[in-house]
Amino acid sequence: MRFVEALRHAILYKGSNEFSKPELIGTIVLKLRLMDYNEAKILIEEAIKRGIIEQKGEKLIIREDFLKEEETREDVFGEMVDYIAKKLGWSHLEVLEDLEKFSERYGDLDKKIIAYLYGLDKGIDMSKFKDKLEV
């Protein structure tokens, strides 16, 4: 998914996993052209929440070990978001933004389960993902 890919490409581009926030956004948006400013901002905030990016003062450190773990999780989550976006006729970003609002009801529940429930809530048949969920 674009989330992990963007962070991995930023590390490869700079040759380091340490960035300032403006530098990381600039790398993802302007240098690599992987997403727009708002998407990059959301990506960084989400990565900090998940512990993929550690914030030490003004420095952001991308934790590559967590990035690898997230990569496998992102595959299923990304597939679910893509599926939901296609079914609703929405953009990937629109689904992620609405999913963020929807997730506030469920607290710290796994994002794949939240995406599954979100799809069901929108009237989408999510049965193809049922076996991919870790409950």
Image (cartoon, rainbow, N blue to C red):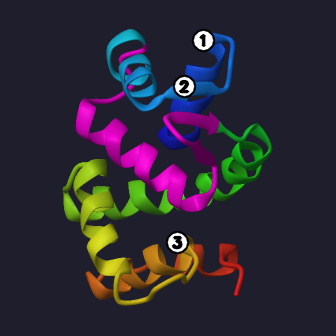
Asked if residue 60 lies left or right of residue 134, the reply is left
Q: Report the residue marked by disc 1.
A: 14
Under circle 1, the secondary element is helix
Q: Is residue 35 above or below residue 85?
A: above
115 and 107: which is toward the camera: 107
Please identify the residue farthest to the right as the structure is shown.
65
Few, some or many residues within 10 Å of mark 3 (<14, 14–19, 20+): some
Q: Are marks 1 and 2 in contact (CB under 8 Å)?
A: yes
Q: Per the image, is 58 magenta?
A: yes
- Quadrant of image for the C terminus: bottom right
Residue drawn at 22 percent across, 64 percent down: 88
* Residue 124 in view: no
Q: Per the image, is 53 magenta?
A: yes
Magenta segment boundaries in residue numbering: 32-61
Badge nearest the viewer, 1 or 2:
2
Q: What is the x, y in percent for residue 50? A: 58, 60
Few, some or many residues within 10 Å of mark 2 (<14, 14–19, 20+): some
Amino acid type indicated by mark 2? Phe
Amino acid type indicated by mark 1? Lys
The mark nearer the N terminus, 3 or 1, is 1
Q: Is residue 79 above or below residue 34?
A: below
Residue drawn at 76 percent across, 44 percent down: 68
The mark nearer the N terminus, 1 or 2, is 1
Q: Which mark is residue 111?
A: 3
Q: What is the x, y in percent for residue 112? A: 55, 72
102 and 116: which is toward the camera: 102
Asked which quadrant contains residue 7, the reply is: top right
Q: Report the residue marked by disc 2.
A: 19
Amino acid type indicated by mark 3? Lys
Asked which quadrant contains residue 98, the reply is: bottom left
Few, some or many residues within 10 Å of mark 1 (<14, 14–19, 20+): few
